[in-house]
Image: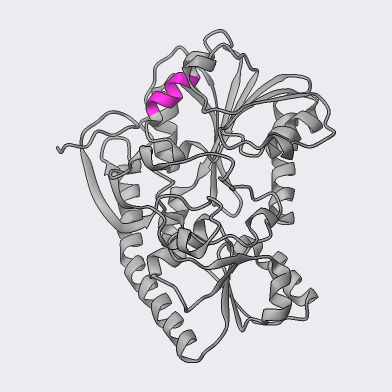
Amino acid sequence: MNEYICPNCFANDIETFFEVKNTPVHNTLLLDSEKEALEFPKGDISLGLCKDCSFIYNTAFDPSVHQYSEKYEETQGFSPTFRAFHKQLAETLIEKHQLHGRKVIEIGCGKGEFLALLCDLGSCDVVGFDPAYVSDRKPSQIKGNMEVVVDFYSEKYQDYKADFVCCKMTLEHIPNTKEFITTVRKSLNQSEQALVFFQVPNMSYVLNEAAFWDIYYEHCSYFTKESLTHLFEDCGFEIKDVWTDYQDQYLMIEAVPSTKMKTSSSHSLEKTKSRINQFLEKDSALVQKWKERLKEIKEKQLKAVIWGGGSKGVAFLSRLGIHDEISYAVDVNPYKDGKYMAGTGQRIVSPSFLAEYKPDIVIIMNPIYHNEIESMLNEMNLYPEIIDL
């Protein structure tokens, strides 16, 4: 036993297993200068494993350092690959759950892109909640009614009724996971037929791939299928489906309110421990491999860029302590153009910048975008060495 209390089940048998010191506390804020980026606040990561529900979380997390506002630029919607996935997901959920004309709530709606898809494709009556929403980026013409509350979702909004509640890539930012899902469950007391859909990063994928670039301060909560199922059942939901998507990077769950309090016995602590051990064995070697490769790039005076000016890029650059080995991070999001990477200070540039820069090496932060990126490079008559993380 120790002083840590699991926010997922309130047990107090936590084992810490992985640490990263002095990492940027935000990965996707728009930073206007290299100086601001280099001086950006940093915090520590100390991942702990709950031996009761197999939940993984940052025991050193301090929520007071976070600033979710219009400067928070998280959208992936400028990628054709991601847009296709987003649209397909919206269409699937609308047809699967017959959401046409129904009331929908999205918790953590970001810039409202998925909310707008549900509204437009399903003629849904939608309400989103997000403190980082930017109103002038709302699509001009959509079917149905769309409202966004520029605030965190909390108990004070429990009177908003819905047939379908979705929450994508938000729960991993919330430290008090059980309290939060309990709040969602209470809000459905008068909507027993409502269905909830949550999407989070898949921690099993991160552990299996030793993807250290997917561990960063903004994400304080890390879920496997077992710990996510445990959380929802413990908070009064019946699980309808759990699956992965986006090349196993995303973990999805569908559930309905239930009056039967049940805690899943399916979670496997040993399975998670085994994945952690494999991750730890691979992590040091992978970090060393990248440090040696980047040293070689610098010695040979090769021009290398990373493609991906978001969370993975910040985590990758910060963990390896990369500065002048790489000068630029490329991103298709025009709102990031001319901004800087938190912690290490690389300037973020648009893909068109590469036509003049002519990089020798492009390191892709997410391999799912490989074909999209290679096509863009070839259209500019660029044929650099491409390395996928």
Picture residue at 14% right of the left edge, 37% below the top: 1
- Whether residue 221 is situated above or below residue 389 in the rendered picture: above
Can residue 211 be seen at all in this image of the molecule?
Answer: no
Of residues 270 and 75, the one drawn nearer to the viewer in this rendering: 75
> Residue 83, image x and y in percent?
72, 49
Seen at 68% across and 51% down, the residue is 82
**Residue at the farthest top position:** 190
- Residue 326 in picture, x, y percent from top left: 51, 76
Q: Does residue 183 belong to the magenta stretch? A: yes
In x, y percent, where is residue 309?
Answer: 57, 61
Where residue 267 sits, quadrant-wise, is top left
For residue 279, say whether it is visible.
yes
Q: In the rendered image of this protein, does residue 272 appear above or below residue 110?
A: below
Image location of residue 57, percent across then percent down: 34, 43
User: Magenta residues?
Assistant: 178-184
* Residue 21 is a magenta residue: no
Q: Relative to 89, is 381 on the left or the right?
A: right
Q: Nearer the viewer, residue 74 or 35?
A: 35
**Is residue 232 shown left or right of residue 306?**
left
Task: Give the residue at the far left of this rendering.
Answer: 1
Q: Quadrant of residue 363?
A: bottom right
At horizontal 33% and vertical 43% (from top left) the residue drawn is 61
- What is the count of numbered marks? 0
